[in-house]
Image (tube, rainbow, N blue to C red):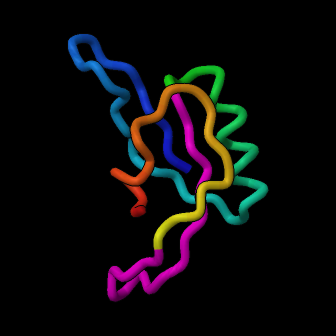
Amino acid sequence: MQAFVEIDDVDHPIPEEPREAPSAGAAKSLAKALAFEKAGVVAFSRTGDFELGEFEDAVILESHGRVPHLADFYGD
């Protein structure tokens, strides 16, 4: 799950540290809860090898609010 905040003098939302969730449902619930206090949030899922740092492109589960072009953060 990725949350974004607004910062003065910046014309686009800034990403906070991503948060891990144990399941797709948990990621969606967290995104919905944070949508009321953040500029934008995205719940996503991706698979890969953490040790090698190789990941597949993310699958967007849902988004709320103002988020930048998602491919800039999670692949095409």
Point out the residue furthest to the front here: 76
Which residue: 21% across, 12% down? 9
Q: Is residue 54 above or below residue 12?
A: below
Residue 43 sits inside the magenta stretch? yes
- Stretch in magenta: 40-56
Which residue: 55% across, 37% down? 41
Between 13 and 19, the residue placed more toward the observer is 13
Which quarter shows the C terminus?
bottom left
Percent from the top left, x then y, of residue 48? 48, 82
Percent from the top left, x then y, of residue 56? 47, 77
Percent from the top left, x then y, of residue 65? 57, 26
Which residue: 52% across, 52% down? 19
Residue 64 sits inside the magenta stretch? no
Left or right: residue 15 versus residue 60 is left
Point out the residue furthest to the top here: 8
Which residue: 67% across, 54% down? 61
Percent from the top left, x then y, of residue 24? 72, 61
Q: Is residue 26 above or below residue 32?
A: below
Q: Is residue 68 above or below residue 25?
A: above
Left or right: residue 21 versus residue 15 is right
What number of labels is visible?
0
Between 39 and 74, the residue placed more toward the observer is 74
Q: Specify the quadrant of the image occupied by residue 5.
A: top left
Between 33 and 42, the residue placed more toward the observer is 42
Q: Specify the quadrant of the image occupied by residue 47.
A: bottom right
Point out the residue furthest to the left here: 9
